[in-house]
Amino acid sequence: MEPHQQIDTICAISTAPGVGGIAVARVSGPEAIAIVSRIWKGRPLEECNSHTVHLGTVLDTQQKPLDQAVATVYRAPRSFTGDDTVEIAIHGSRWIQRELIATLCDAGCRLAEPGEFTRRAFAAGKMDLAEAEAVADMIASTSRAAHRIASGQMRGHYSAHLKALRDKLIDLAALLELELDFSEEEVEFASREKLRQLARELHDEISRLTSSFRSGAAIKDGVPVAIIGPTNAGKSSLLNAIVGDERAIVSSIHGTTRDIIEDTVEIGDYLFRFQDTAGLRQTDDTIERIGIDRSLSAASKAHIVILVVDLSAPLDREPDDLTLPEDTPCIVYLNKTDLVDDAQIAEAVNRTREQHPATTIISGTTHSSETIAELRDALTGIMDRETDSGAGDILVTNARHVQALTQALDSVSRVIRGLDANLSGDFIAQDIRETIHHLATITGDITTPDLLATIFSRFCIGK
């Protein structure tokens, strides 16, 4: 943010674009109350206390009544941005919104840049950079789990966790610095073994945070679930049953699904992105082969895989080129149990356990609400276990953060190697300082103007 921009008074519509019952315009800056007063008819806002709400009328550029409005006054520093702020609630007509912003600009405001209100809050020390980024995640959250993660980060849980890590690193660096200062006197303030233990604890914690990004990103963007299996196994029927809509074409003709069909549905606390893929089989059809390759690619990138098996078909129909991705949770769904007897079902279950021992096995039919409920429970159960196994309740959802954590992990690994090799403390201290630096970039204790411009440019204008 340029120095002159911080002293400007800015305005924007803070509610979602479009028509609604109510729209809210936010005005913030040193002249916010004075500027709004120029277009306000009602109790003088200069006389109003902070955090008070007032009914009045906003005027247009010709000083004629534009709309009845409610003004909420926030005086510095007790506001979101730390500056004087007035929020004006008006009727949600697009025309009224445009006229109000034009009138405010005519009265002395400047239209806010994307994310400028939140950037001012960061500059005023109202929140650190990780908390500021969580504001955007909160607005974009599409499920209870995504909301819970963003809410915790916005309240500072994630930042407090990072601060605790940095404090431990600072303690480690201080011990090494003391060792260097008193090296000639042969005074040992901490044994190398104690330093190694502390470094390993930090390494494990940063590693857990880094690993949590896979689950965190999936929850934030929607958990990708690839539905795969041979042709005519019932994949499209399963997709339709889960999402409750005839999303995919169902046909007895082999190879009907040629491309990936995707739909989203919220199940429990999570948003899932289901991908119905082309059936896997040997084929000379070039177009179908492309679809099959895309199916295998989708399976390799999915967070969860559902393998659909047709029990009414020979058990050796599973394609030779199907290899379930390692470390990817998989549900094997044995479909069409209504067409086979109990002995065949038991045989299929045992065979599946031998081939895919780490998978969840569900048998049933897509026409059964109990089967679909069991599948839904299995999906949410996988995500519940992943979130519970994270670093406490901390899940990393931001690609910028995981990049910084990866760099911090490399640095702290060098610390451990240096301690193991009994290197001089000055070399190890440098690696510790690098680790502290990388963690500091997450919370914004170390930033660059280009980094801030990139981050806040992704925000909506009114935030």
Image: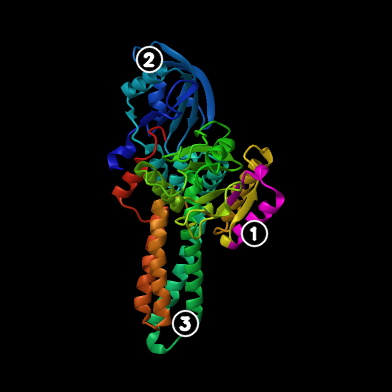
Q: What amino acid is at disc 1? A: Asn
Q: Vertically, is 19 above or below 387?
A: above
- Tell me the distance, in whole angstroms, between the alpha carbons under discs 2 and 1: 76 Å
Q: What amino acid is at disc 2? A: Asp
Picture disc at residue 350: 1
Is 173 on the left-hand or right-hand side of 365? left
Image quadrant assignment for residue 429: bottom left
Rendering coords of residue 101 (x, y %) = 37, 23
Image quadrant assignment for residue 402: bottom left
Q: Which residue is mark 3?
A: 192
Crowdedness near tag 2: few (<14), some (14–19) or many (≥20) residues, C-alpha within 10 Å: many
- Regarding mark 1 in the picture, which secondary structure is present there? helix
- Disc 3 or 1, which lies upstream in sequence? 3
Q: What amino acid is at disc 3? A: Arg
- Tell me the distance, in whole angstroms, between the alpha carbons under discs 3 and 1: 53 Å
Rendering coords of residue 174 (x, y %) = 43, 73
Q: Vertically, is 206 above or below 223?
A: below
Is residue 415 or residue 38 the one in the foreground?
A: 415
* Residue at the right extreme, as displayed: 342
Is residue 181 or residue 343 the one in the foreground?
A: 343
Q: Is residue 104 magenta?
A: no
Instruction: Specify the segment rendered in magenta.
Output: 332-354
Q: Which residue is mark 2?
A: 60
Q: Are marks 2 and 1 in contact (CB under 8 Å)?
A: no
- Disc 2 or 1, which lies upstream in sequence? 2
Is residue 290 or residue 272 the one in the foreground?
A: 290
Q: Vertically, is 430 above or below 95?
A: below
Rendering coords of residue 203 (x, y %) = 47, 68
